[in-house]
Amino acid sequence: MAKATKENTKIRTVSHFHELFEMLEVYRAHKDKIDILQKNDGTLERAFFVLAYHPNVQWVLPEGEPPYKKNTETMDGFGFMNLKKNMAQFNLFIKGRGYDNRPLARREQKFIQMLESVTPLEAKWILQCKDRNLTHCPVDVVRSAYPDLLPDESKT
């Protein structure tokens, strides 16, 4: 597969998270990133950015990258699993979502299974989401694209 560039990655509405992440990595200008997010304004996309940046979301996994095997066997977005299919599983890794009594080792195992089931690009973004550091989509871009998504910084 060819490396994503501005020439072969136009700003558009997409059906897979990996395409959204590709665009956000290719386009550097905040204005372009905001346009990309607004063109892809869906429930799952918003949920992903809430997991990354909402101050009330508390991840119960350790920071950093766990040891996992990158999934190199599937085409981007067309594997058995993809990030959209995995979104419900994120509740396992967030405090107060009904799984607080689950042992940490079991949660970590499920997280690694998720990382191994998605594309390498999606896995990279999931890890950055967990560590609240989406390098190609900072919180100010998310706030500009979705003004009602996150609480006002002055109130947190």
Image (spheres, rainbow, N blue to C red):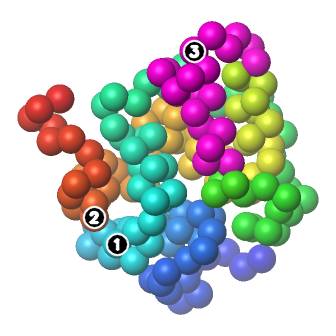
Q: Quadrant of the C terminus?
A: top left
Q: Is residue 105 above or below residue 150?
A: above
Mark 3 Cα within 10 Å, few/some/many (few <14, many 20+)? some
Between label 3 and label 2, give the one nearer the viewer: 3
* Mark 1, other Cα within 10 Å: few <14 / some 14–19 / many ≥20: some
**Residue occupying the point 62% across, 44% down:** 88
- The type of residue carrying mark 3 is Asp
In the rendered structure, find residue 38 and report the number of the disc placed on it. Answer: 1
The region drawn magenta spans 86-106
Please give the residue where the numbered disc 2 appears in the rendered image: 145
> Which residue lies under the disc numbered 3?
100
- Helix, strand, or loop for circle 2? helix
Q: CA distance from mark 1 to mark 3?
A: 34 Å
Which quadrant would residue 84 be assigned to in this image?
bottom right
* Residue positioned 63% across, 10% down in the render: 101
Residue 122 coordinates in the image, percent (x, y)? 65, 54
Circles 1 and 2, Cβ within 8 Å, touching? The answer is yes
